[in-house]
Image (tube, helix red, strand yellow):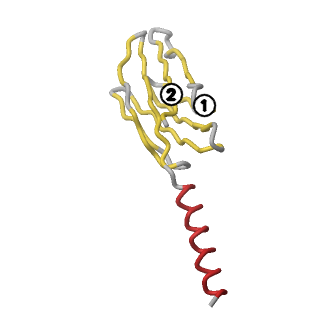
Amino acid sequence: MKLHQLIVIACLIGGASVTTAQESIRLQFEIVKDGSTVATPEVSVISGTTGTIELDRGRIAFTPTQRGSESVAVAFDVRLAGKRLQPHLVIGRSEPGTLSWQSDTGAESFTIRVSWIR
């Protein structure tokens, strides 16, 4: 009987760690074009999966990955205004990240700010 109880406890502990690994990460984005905010979506995705923000002139795909309790790594695939960027940021609870670039002609500027919401 004690061996049976031990197996059940081990299964419960294993199940708890799987649940923790599948926890959602909430991110707040601010997307700015030429100094004006054009979108401020808040998105929740499971760590290691890809979320997408669709915009008029492109899209922003992002994959956040939990790095312990204090930081999240975010891999981006940005296709916007004829450009493709694939940067990576590491953000913390109180440390947002920022991406900035200009269009090929220099006529437009873009900024993406991302914050981890708990």
Q: Is residue 104 above or below residue 41?
A: above
Q: Is residue 34 above or below residue 16?
A: above
Residue found at x 60% / y 67%: 13
Rendering quarter of residue 1 = bottom right
Numbered badge on residue 33: none
75 or 57, which is in the foreground?
75
Furthest-front residue in view?
Answer: 2
Mark 2 = which residue?
Answer: 114
What's under tag 1, amino acid-wise?
Ile
Going 38% across and 12% down the picture, which residue do you hit? 36
Number of marks drawn: 2
User: What distance separates the C-alpha of mark 1 from that of mark 2?
Assistant: 8 Å
Q: Would you identify the image quadrant in which residue 3 lies?
A: bottom right
Q: Position of residue 92 (x, y in %)?
A: 60, 31
Q: Nearer the viewer, residue 45 or 81?
A: 45
Relative placement, left or right, of 43 versus 19 is left
Residue 60 in the figure: left or right of residue 68: left
Residue displayed at 55% across by 55% down: 20
**What percent of the width, then of the height, locates residue 12?**
56, 71
Residue 66 percent coordinates (x, y):
60, 44
Residue 60, compared with residue 108, is above or below; it is below
Q: Is residue 1 above or below residue 39?
A: below
Name which residue lies at 58% across and 33% down: 86
- For label 2, the crowd category at 10 Å Cα-Cα, with few meaning under 14, some 14 to 19 and many 20 or more, is many
Element under label 2?
strand
- Left or right: residue 71 versus residue 112 is right
Q: Which mark is residue 91?
A: 1
How packed mark 1 is, by other alpha carbons closer than 10 Å (few <14, some 14-19, many 20 or more), is many
- Return the residue nearer the eye: 68 or 59: 68
- Tell me the amino acid under the disc marked 2: Val
Would you say the residues marked 1 and 2 are in contact, meaning their CB atoms lie under 8 Å apart? yes
